Image (cartoon, rainbow, N blue to C red):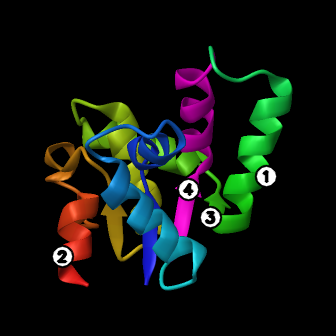
Amino acid sequence: MRLLIDGNILLDVLQKREPHYVDSANVWKMCETDIAEGCVSALTFANLVYVMRKELDAEKISEVHKKLSLIFNFVDMNASDISIAVDMKWDDFEDAVQAVTAKRIHADFIITRNVRDYNKSEVVAFTPTEFLARQ
């Protein structure tokens, strides 16, 4: 099973954000133990570094990238993804790009805490709690 992991899930674990940490960490663990293939878009990593910019220097960015690379497959974002997302005219452009990426890589699900923004996505989005309840 292939999952596109949204940035808020990674941030929940990296920053131990409650009350979301436990379920997000359990999804992370599924990817780490190859129960699921976790994919992270290149856009997500760039956004993650931006959000955590006050916590990360160049060395820590490298450490986080290495750690994530051991667990998740980074997937490219391409010009076609951008064009398709623009044409979708979603309120949240970044979510449109994620939905397009998920479809292109044949993800089974998008895992995010922001499911309402994916209601038009061809790939179904679940929160970690919803996803874990289905397993």
Q: Residues within 10 Å of mark 3 (few under 14, many from 20)?
A: many
The earlier-in-sequence mark between 1 and 4 is 4
Q: What separation in Å lies between label 1 and label 4 (alpha carbons)?
A: 13 Å
Label 3 vs label 2, nearer the camera: 2
Of the residues shown, which amino acid type is indicated by label 4? Val
Residue 32's place in the image compared with 85, above or below, is below
Residue bearing mark 2: 133
Of the residues shown, which amino acid type is indicated by label 2? Ala
x and y, in percent, of residue 94 in the image: 39, 36
Residue bearing mark 4: 40
Residue furthest right as drawn:
59
Q: What separation in Å lies between label 3 and label 4 (alpha carbons)?
A: 6 Å
Label 1 vs label 4, nearer the camera: 1
Tell me the element at label 3. Answer: loop
Evaluate if marks 3 and 4 touch, with contact meaning CB atoms under 8 Å apart. yes
Residue 113's place in the image compared with 55, above or below, is below
**Residue 44 part of the magenta-drawn span:** yes
Residue 28's place in the image compared with 95, above or below, is below
Residue bearing mark 1: 66
On-image quarter of the N terminus: bottom left
Of the residues shown, which amino acid type is indicated by label 3? Phe
How many numbered dots are placed on residues in this image? 4
x and y, in percent, of residue 12 in the image: 41, 43
Residue furthest top as drawn:
54
Label 3 vs label 4, nearer the camera: 3
**Residue 81 part of the magenta-drawn span:** no
Residue at x 76% of width, y 33% of height: 61
Q: What separation in Å lies between label 1 and label 3 (alpha carbons)?
A: 10 Å
x and y, in percent, of residue 117 in the image: 19, 43
The earlier-in-sequence mark between 1 and 3 is 1
Give the magenta range. 37-53
Residue at x 36% of width, y 49% of height: 21
